[in-house]
Image (cartoon, rainbow, N blue to C red):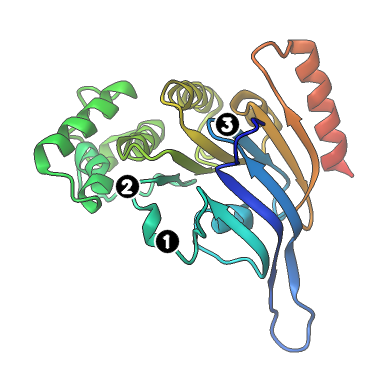
């Protein structure tokens, strides 16, 4: 982590959900401290139900912590949600394309919400579709695209807004292995080439190793079990040792 202030910060964050009746509250996140530096690609890894999505939702401003503080670029994402228009983009597990809009029109959607004029809006959408290998499919509707192609459109939509922060909630989990691997490599390349900061939620160890330059492994309720930096120089043998270490943590 650089000496600069983190762009995403969670300090002593807890999140609980009240159950019906007299049952005690369910604690999803327990006094979590987590900072993400500018330009970092963080893979947030853990088993289903460990609190990954709860953390994701708090960073995205979709939910407020029960205690502690969440800040993104120095602001409270829940209370200042509108301040993040065009500054934070989300790629969900499903592509969430509008079926009545073509690929280019779906990519334009975020730019429309930012009130970008029609000509530069379409130029930006066409540019990102081309960058993601969809030249010639701009006018196709979602039903005519494969699952991988639809997810490329959703990634293009996120990058087209030029948001500095990208939040990804298991966006490739429904794809076949080869398509998922190709899209992961493209995603990492685009994040690094464009200087973005990304938080990538996953339950796959292999995906975390392919995506992240840092892996945070969570245990339930969401607390950090291990925080591992990765570099381009991390060798195959080291990655296997890291994989074994993570497997032991998740199996506990």
User: Can residue 153 be seen in the rendering of this structure?
Assistant: yes
Q: Which numbered marker is on residue 97? A: 2
The answer to the question of whether label 1 and label 2 lie on touching residues, with beta carbons closer than 8 A, is no
The quarter of the picture where residue 190 lies is top left
Mark 2 or mark 3: name the one nearer the start of the chain: 3
Above-or-below relation of 125 to 14: above
Residue 158 picture location, percent across and down: 37, 40
State which mark lies toward you, 1 or 2: 1
Residue 23 picture location, percent across and down: 78, 82
Q: Residue at x 69, y 55 (%)?
A: 11
Most extreme residue toward the left, as rendered? 119
Residue 220 picture location, percent across and down: 79, 55
- State the residue position of label 1: 81
Q: Residue at x 34, y 47 (%)?
A: 86
Q: How far, Cα to Cα, is label 2 from label 3? A: 27 Å
Q: Nearer the viewer, residue 55 or 4?
A: 4
Q: Residue at x 76, y 19 (%)?
A: 239
Q: Nearer the viewer, residue 146 or 55?
A: 55
Above-or-below relation of 245 to 238: below
Q: Which numbered marker is on residue 40? A: 3
Q: How far, Cα to Cα, is label 1 from label 3? A: 22 Å
């Amino acid at each position: 982590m650089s000496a600069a202030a983190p762009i995403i910060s969670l300090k002593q964050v807890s999140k609980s959900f009240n159950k019906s009746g007299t049952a005690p509250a369910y604690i999803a996140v327990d006094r979590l401290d987590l900072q993400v530096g500018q330009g970092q690609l963080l893979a947030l890894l853990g088993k289903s139900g460990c609190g990954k999505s709860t953390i994701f939702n708090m960073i995205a401003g979709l939910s407020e912590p029960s205690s502690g503080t969440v800040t993104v670029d120095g602001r409270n994402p829940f209370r200042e949600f509108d301040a993040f228009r065009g500054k934070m983009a989300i790629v969900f597990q499903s592509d969430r394309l509008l079926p009545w809009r073509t690929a280019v029109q779906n990519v334009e959607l975020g730019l429309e919400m930012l009130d970008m004029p029609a000509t530069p809006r379409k130029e930006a959408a066409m540019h990102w579709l081309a960058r993601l290998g969809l030249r010639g499919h701009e006018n196709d509707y979602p039903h005519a695209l494969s699952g991988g192609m639809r997810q490329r459109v959703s990634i293009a939509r996120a990058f087209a807004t030029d948001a500095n922060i990208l939040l990804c909630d298991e966006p490739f989990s429904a794809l076949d292995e080869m398509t998922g691997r190709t899209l992961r490599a493209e995603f990492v390349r685009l994040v690094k080439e464009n200087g973005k900061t990304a938080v990538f939620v996953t339950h796959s160890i292999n995906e975390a190793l392919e995506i992240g330059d840092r892996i945070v492994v969570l245990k339930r309720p969401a607390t950090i079990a291990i925080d591992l930096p990765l570099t381009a120089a991390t060798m195959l043998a080291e990655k296997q040792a890291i994989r074994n270490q993570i497997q032991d943590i998740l199996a506990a």
